[in-house]
Image: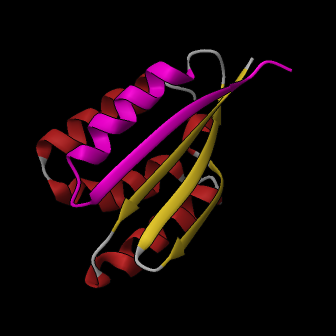
Amino acid sequence: MEVYIDVSFAVDEENKSFWESVFDALQEGKVATIFHKNLSGFGEVVEGELDAMLDKWPMEYFIPEGWSCEQGRISASFLTASDGAEFAKELVYLFGLCPVKELEISVYEDDE
């Protein structure tokens, strides 16, 4: 079973290019490097949560299937496996620690 996770959040104009560079790098598969390089600046709690997630979850879960930035809103889709709902809960916590607004995360299953 495949589980899809859609993530969407608003960013301030001054943070827009930062988040675009993060998602560009993630889509290229530079997960650990880009997360640590960029998100570690948000403090020890974010860095600790990120380390725990990178140790626990397959690297593929962090690579977006696609993403966009329109009207100050970042949207991304991630493909996971049957444990995707649990991964999504941890994403909610991680992004909640970052300077984003109006965070929305939805999870849906594809049983085919």
Locate residue 77, reporting x and y percent.
61, 48
Residue at far right of view: 112
- Determine the image quadrant of residue 86: top left
Left-right relation of 55 to 97: right
Locate residue 32, reporting x and y percent.
46, 46
Locate residue 30, reporting x and y percent.
56, 55
Residue at position x 52%, y 73% from top? 69
Is residue 69 or residue 24 the one in the foreground? 69
Left-right relation of 2 to 96: right
Residue at position x 44%, y 42% from top? 105
Residue at position x 13%, y 44% from top? 44
Determine if the magenta segment contains residue 34. no
- Determine the image quadrant of residue 84: top right
**Which range of residues does the magenta coloring cover?**
84-112
Locate residue 40, reporting x and y percent.
24, 53
Residue at far bottom of view: 14
